[in-house]
Amino acid sequence: MVKRFFLITVIAVLVLAALPVTVGAQDDGPERSGIRPDAPPYGIRGPYPVGFALHTIVDDNERLLNAHIWYPALNPDAAEDTVEYLLPYFPDGVFGHALLGAAPDLDHGPYPLVIFAHGWYGQRLNSPYLCEHLASYGFVAISVAYQDNMAVAEQPTYPSMISRPADVSRQIDYAEQLTADGDWAGLIDTENIGVAGHSLGGYTALAAGGARLDWDSFGALCADHPEYDPLGFCGLLLGYTGDMATLAGWDAVPDSPWPSLGDPRVDVVVPLAPAAQFFGTSGMVDIAVPVLMLGGTADTMVVPEPSFFQPYSAITAPKTLVRFAGGGHMLFFYGCDDAPWMIPYGAFWACSDPVWDMDRAHDLIDHFVTAFFLAELYGDEDAAAALAPDAVAFPGITYETTAY
């Protein structure tokens, strides 16, 4: 009996010690937890109820951007936050936890902005769990459909290499408009901005942060190692550098690495399994903002060594790398539990991982990404301490940092 009491006491102490410091939200609401009971501290849901809204970004660009926005919200009646996000061209949606159309919590704002970029021929709801999680910690997260989204899969890829970073700037412009007046006045802190993204969305985040395209390096990689190009980007892009230069507004094809397509308003970037092979190493050295990079060591779609580990090595800004041992490319996608129709649809591969339990992976992704944004955009010392090397001891995770 004494041993049992001692064990229960120890477990309770450990659980309480794992809870992160909150950032000044409402104290009431549902009990906070991670996806799994063993979620790390910043993998536990944050203190804010999460609102969700659909917007369309209209500006001088003739291509509209359909946007999903997650934000800290009010929930005075403790309404159930289960939501089904509808997906185009699919029979059902993706389940999540947010309140559609809830009033924003303006009293605790403004909140830093995080832009999330989906992968190649993906959709803006590829990782809603992460956008929800960030909103629960006091961020406004925006995800749009980029030019290569799933609805236009027959279109060429090369225009998106230029339009993606430009669309990041369009989203920042729109956030500045939203927070200037109207129902969302004062909601968004556009002086503190992060960009995250998966796969080609990781390219987008790095480009927005100042990485420069190096087609000479990428061309040499294609010639010497065709096995490093399972998705066929060599054929899709290398013959169109002139077209891309024209889309960027240049009179001629620049020498490599190309001028930056980034936005100086971006403060930090989080590439997830990024397609960074287009930058090589020379195109990465001009990134001047902190970088948190996550990737799986067994990725078969974006080959890890040339696509993100080598480019990461060239970053001179403060940087942090999280390796998921044996993890694949879809580790950062929503899981099959959130979209059970994926399995009979024949897409189990897209919402699962051969090695990792997706819930565990998502708890860890939430933990690292949230702690990083809190540390960098809020100056949160507790979050920064959670990223110190001696604080990172998770089975299957290899970790390195120059920042903490």
Image (tube, helix red, strand yellow):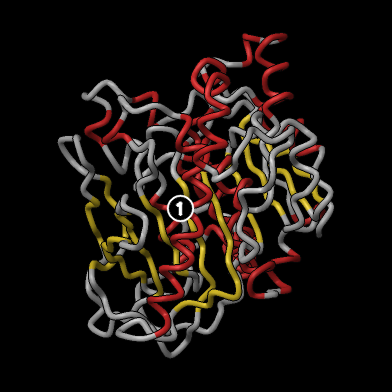
Image-based side of 376 in relation to 341, left or right = right
Identify the residue shown where x is 39% and y is 70%: 71
Q: Is residue 163 above or below residue 380?
A: above
| Mark 1 residue type | Asp
Q: Is residue 3 above or below residue 251?
A: below
Foreground pick, 213 / 326: 213
Q: Quadrant of residue 120?
A: top left
In the picture, which quadrant includes the C terminus?
Answer: bottom right
Q: In this figure, which residue is indicated by the disc labeled 1?
A: 167
Identify the residue shown where x is 60% and y is 40%: 251
Mark 1 residue element: helix
Can the viewer see residue 2 in this picture? Answer: no
Q: Quadrant of residue 100?
A: bottom left
Residue 334's x, y, as percent?
39, 41
Foreground pick, 167 / 7: 167
Q: Is residue 90 above or below residue 367?
A: above
Foreground pick, 14 / 186: 186
In the picture, which quadrant includes the N terminus?
Answer: bottom right
Q: Is residue 55 above or below residue 159?
A: below
Image-based side of 110 in relation to 383, left or right = left
Image-based side of 210 in relation to 142, left or right = right
Number of numbered callouts drawn = 1
Residue 355's x, y, as percent?
53, 26
Farthest left residue?
A: 91
How many residues crowd mark 1 within 10 Å: few (<14), some (14–19), many (20+)?
Answer: many
Residue 158's x, y, as percent?
48, 30
Farthest bottom residue?
A: 107
Identify the residue shown where x is 27% and y is 39%: 339
Can the viewer see residue 311 in this picture? Answer: yes
Identify the residue shown where x is 27% and y is 20%: 346
Farthest front residue?
A: 251
Residue 279's x, y, as percent?
69, 34
